[in-house]
Image (cartoon, grey):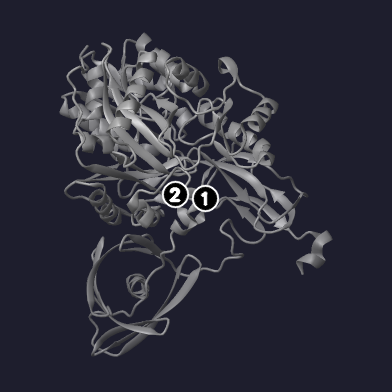
Amino acid sequence: MAIDKLLVANRGEIARRVFSTAKDLGIATVAVFSDADADAPFVAEADEAVRIGPGPATKSYLDIDALLDAAKRTGADAIHPGYGFVSENAEFARRCSEAGITFVGPGPEAIAAMGDKVIAKAKMIEAGVPVVPGYQPPDGQDADDATLIAEAERIGVPVLVKASAGGGGRGMRRVTALADLPAAIESARSEAKAAFGNGALFLERLITGARHIEIQLVADQHGHVAVFGERECSVQRRHQKVIEEAPSIAVDADLRARMSEAATAAAKAIDYVGAGTVEFMLDAEGSFYFLEMNTRLQVEHPVTELVTGHDLVRLQILAAEGKSLADVQTRIEGHAIEARLYAEDPSAGFVPQLGPIALWRPASGRHVRVDDGVQTGQTITAFYDPMVAKVVAWGRDRDEARRRLAAAVADSVLLGPGTNRSFLLGLLRDGDFAKGDFFTDTLDAREDLLPAAAPSTAVWALAALLRGPAPAVAPWHSTGDVQWSVDLSHGERTQTVLFAQSTEGLQATVDEQTLPIRIVSADEPVVVAEIDGILRRYVWARLDADRVAVDDAGHAFTFAEPRLVGGSDEQGGGDEVRTPMGGRVVKVLVEPGAAVEAGQTVAIVEAMKMEHRVTAPRAGVVAGVTATPDQQVEPRQLLATLEPDENNKEEQT
C-alpha cells in the first residue's frame, strides 16, 4: 500500500532526515513535538505539526496514545519512528497495525524477539549465529543478584553486566573485580528501569582488544534481504559510540561475506522487515560474535549511505509499502567517517551542557554532510539526548575522509553551551586513530585525549576588546593616547588585559606579552582582527552583557566578568553540593547528620538518559538535604549542604 502522509514519531535531526526523503518521494509529512521543542527546526519543516505534551519524554514522545491521536487527527497513514523513543517498542508497532497505520519498521514479533537481549541470543544460537559467551536467564526471566554473582564467578572477570531490554550503553556496567559486582548490578538495574522500564540483567564475557562491527541490512516483505556492508563503531566511551566509519579497515572481502551471511540468517530467523543492524564483536583472531540486533535505523546510517549511494530511509519506506528489494545492488566506494557532536564537557566527565544556543554554524562543503537538529536561539534542555549534530565526511580513502572530517568538525561552531568538539578534534588527529589502532576499550584508557586546549594570548586580547569596557571612543578608531584594562575569566583562570592606544596603534598586554591588535570588522558572527601582524577571522557571539564566546581553530572559549565563588570544586562551594547538570533526581544517598567523605556520592541525577553521581566536595557532616527523589533540578541547583565534623576538627585543621 502506497504511503501518502507520513508522521515521524521523533524529534531533532532524525525527524529532519526522514522529512527530507519523504518530501523527495512526494509524501506529505507530519511532525509531533513537545513544549520543549516548540521552536525546533524540525517542527517548521513538516507540512503539519501537532503538540503532543510537555517536555519530559514520558509525557510526549513516549506517549503512544498521543502519537496515534496525532496520526488520526492529521490523517497520516504511516508512522516512521526514527531511532530511540518508540522505535523498538513492540506495543507501539502492534497498536499502529490495529489502527490501520503502516509502521515503517519490522513487525511487533520481530521487535520483541530482538528487544530482549536474552531471547535474541537464544534465537541466534538456533540460527547458527555465533554469540558471546556469558549467562542468560532462562525464558527471558529476571535473575536475582545472587544468581548473577554466582554466574559471574563462573565466567570470570572482566565481565559486562547488561540490561536485557537495553542498548546504547544504558544499563551496562564493566566489572573488572568481583568485589565491585554488587554495586554494578544495583546501578545497572536502576539505570535500565529508568531508561527501558525493565531492570532485568544478563552477563557477557568482556572481550578485550575487540572491534565493534555492525552489518546494515534492509529486508522486504517477500523474503529478500539486501545487505549494505559493515560499519566500524569501535571508538566508544562507556559503550557510547563516538566515531563511526564505513567500511572497516579490519574487514576484508571474505570476512565481510561471512558476517553478511550471519546477519542475513539473523534477519530471516525472525522474519524481519525493514532497516536493521546486526552488531558483532570482532576479536583479535578474526572470530566474530553476535551482540544484538537494532530493529530500527541507526544513528550512524549516514556513513553507509555515503559509501553505497543508497538512501536507507527511502528503502525503509519502499519495504513498508510492500515493494520488492530483490534488485537492490550494493557497491562500496571510498570511505566515510561520522563524529557525534554533543553538548557536553569532556573535561568534567562529559557532563551535559544546557542552555540557549547563541550561535550554531554547521560546516558545509563538498563531501561533507551535517545532520543537525538545532538552530541559533534554541535552548538545549535536560529532557533529551545532548547530541547536537552528526558531522560526516567522505573521502576516496580513509585518511582523506579523516582529514576532511577534522576540518568539518573544526568548522562546525556552536557557541553558548559547551561541546565535545575539542575532544573530537584531538581524537581525529590522534596517531593511533589515524592508523586504525583503536578498539572498544581504547578510548576509556586514553585520558590524554581529554581536551587541554586553552585560550591563546591573542584570543585573550581579542575577547577583552570585544567584551569591554572600553573608552567612549572605540579604540580601533581613536587617535589619542589612551590606556585601560579589562578583567576576564575563563573557567578557573582570571586574566587582566592591558590596552594602550597611541598614534602608532593599539597594543594589548597579556602575561607580560605585548601584541599589536587591530579590529578590521566586528559584526557578529565574524570578527576580522589583525593580531601581532597576522590577519584572521574568528567566529564569536555575545552571550549576554557580561559574556562573550570566541572560536579559535575549532576550540570555543567563553569569557566572562570575573566573579568571586566559594570553593573550587565544580559542584559548588565547599559547604554546598550542587548538581553540575539539570535532570531528574534518581536517588538521594545521605540524610541530615550523616558523615560523608570527600568524593562520596550524595545523590544520583539522571540527565540525557544517563545516570550521574553527584559527590561531596569535602569531608564533613550533612547539615541539610534539599533534593528529593524524582525531583526535576536545574544546573547547579543545591542538593545538600555540609558543615564541619566536630569529631574531626583536629584533622581538618
**Above or below 604: residue 124:** above
Q: Position of residue 617 (x, y in %)?
A: 64, 57
- Residue that label 2 marks: 354
The residue shown at (47%, 18%) is 125
The picture quadrant where one finds residue 584 is top right
* Of pointers 1 and 2, the one earlier in the residue sequence: 2
The kind of residue on which mark 2 rests is: Leu
- Judge whether 522 appears above or below 69 on screen: below
Q: What numbered label is drawn on residue 635? A: 1
Residue 416, placed above or below residue 196: below
Separation (CA) of disc 1 from disc 2: 8 Å
Of 445 and 419, the residue lying toward us: 445
Q: Position of residue 460 (x, y in %)?
A: 37, 73
Q: Is residue 32 visible to us here?
A: no
Specify few, some or many for label 1: CA neighbours under 10 Å numbering under 14, 14-19, or 20 or more. Answer: some
Which quadrant, please, contains the C terminus? bottom right
Quick check: 108 left or right of 143? left
- Report the quarter where the N terminus lies: top left
Whether residue 625 sits left or right of residue 542 in the image: it is right
Closer-to-camera residue (212/589): 212
At 63% from the left edge and 23% from the top edge, which residue is drawn? 143
Under circle 2, the secondary element is loop
Closest to the observer: 521 or 239?
239
Residue 476: x %, y % from top left: 25, 79
Residue 118 in sight? yes
Please identify the residue farthest to the right as the structure is shown: 647
* Residue at screen point 31% across, 29% down: 216
| Residue 648 locus on image (x, y percent) | 81, 61
Q: Nearer the viewer, residue 175 or 636?
A: 175
